[in-house]
Amino acid sequence: MASDLFGGARRFFHSAQGSPEQISGDGFRRFSTNEEAQQYGDRVWGDSADRLPTDQHRAVRRFTLHSWPYTSLSRAENPQRLLERLAGDSKLRGDLLELYDGRLPTLSELRHDTALLNEAASRPLTAGVELHRSLSRVSFMKHYDGSDPRSLVGTLQTTSAPMSASLGDPPLNPFRLHLLAPPEQRGLWIGRSSSHPNQREFLLPAGTGYHMKAAIPGPMYSWDLYGRLIPGV
């Protein structure tokens, strides 16, 4: 059973009521509409992504266009072999060419961009917020039993690559991950600077850890997963 903390998060997340800066008893800001989430991000963090150094800004734009190369390569046992295989796939090759202005990137370039992303996402939060992430699968998570997402409850997850999340309602997918981000959690509000400016995107660095606290089944074989980020992990 979910704790009161995450039960409250779920009730608020699916509520149509609330103010632009609803702060529950646990001290985390939540938003009842995407418009309120956007307004909060614009007011508190503004155009922070646009004020990054040029190389970091370019890496962030690439990541928001196609994040899968960074994620896939970070999980691969042999990243170079995987990159070669991806470059041979017509659809995936097109994504890589789009990222790097019509040429295929080297593994070193992708790793350098990952380092730049981690540098960009190094700004500590001054107040706790709830972030959300939409997932098509959870098979990549550690300790998943392959059939029941509740097997993830109680586990510690650590991101192998920079990870995108959002303020407000995540896009529709079978799995919705809701993460409490406490003060001092490091990250970067991308917001309107994203290649997808309406997604209210927030970037977390590689190596971000979170404890999985609850998994609740929803309609149409969907699941709501609840976790808490661990600053410094």
Image: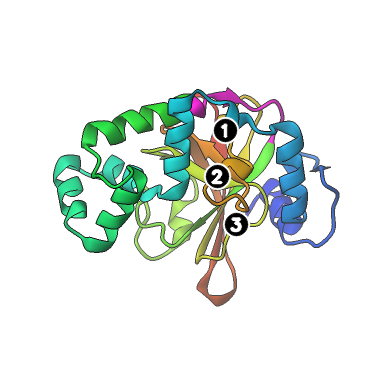
**Taken as a whole, is the magenta stretch helix, strand or loop?**
loop
Q: Position of residue 56 (x, y in %)?
A: 46, 28
Q: Position of residue 107 (x, y in %)?
A: 22, 36
Quadrant including the N terminus: bottom right
Q: Position of residue 72 (x, y in %)?
A: 30, 48
Residue at x 44% of width, y 49% of height: 65
- Up the image or down, 129 lies above or below 170; here it is above
Q: Is residue 126 magenta?
A: yes
The answer to which of marks 3 and 2 sits earlier in the sequence is 3
The answer to which of marks 3 and 1 sits earlier in the sequence is 3
Residue 187 figure quarter = top right
Residue behind mark 2: 194
Q: Position of residue 66 (x, y in %)?
A: 40, 50
Q: Disc 3, disc 2: CB below 8 Å? A: no
> CA–CA distance between discs 2 and 1?
11 Å
Residue behind mark 3: 170
For the record, the magenta segment spans 120-128
Which residue type carries mark 2?
A: Ser
Q: Is residue 215 left or right of residue 141?
A: right
For the residue labelled by badge 1, is the local secondary structure a helix, a strand or a loop? strand
> CA–CA distance between discs 3 and 2?
15 Å
Q: How is the image coloured?
A: rainbow
- Up the image or down, 136 lies above or below 60; here it is below
Which residue type carries mark 3?
A: Pro
How many neighbours does mark 3 have within 10 angstroms: few (below 14), some (14-19), or many (20 or more)? Answer: many
Residue at x 71% of width, y 51% of height: 9
Q: Is residue 128 left or right of residue 108?
A: right
Q: Is residue 63 left or right of residue 130?
A: left
> CA–CA distance between discs 3 and 1?
17 Å
For the residue labelled by badge 2, is the local secondary structure a helix, a strand or a loop? loop
Residue occupying the far front of the picture: 102
Residue behind mark 1: 188
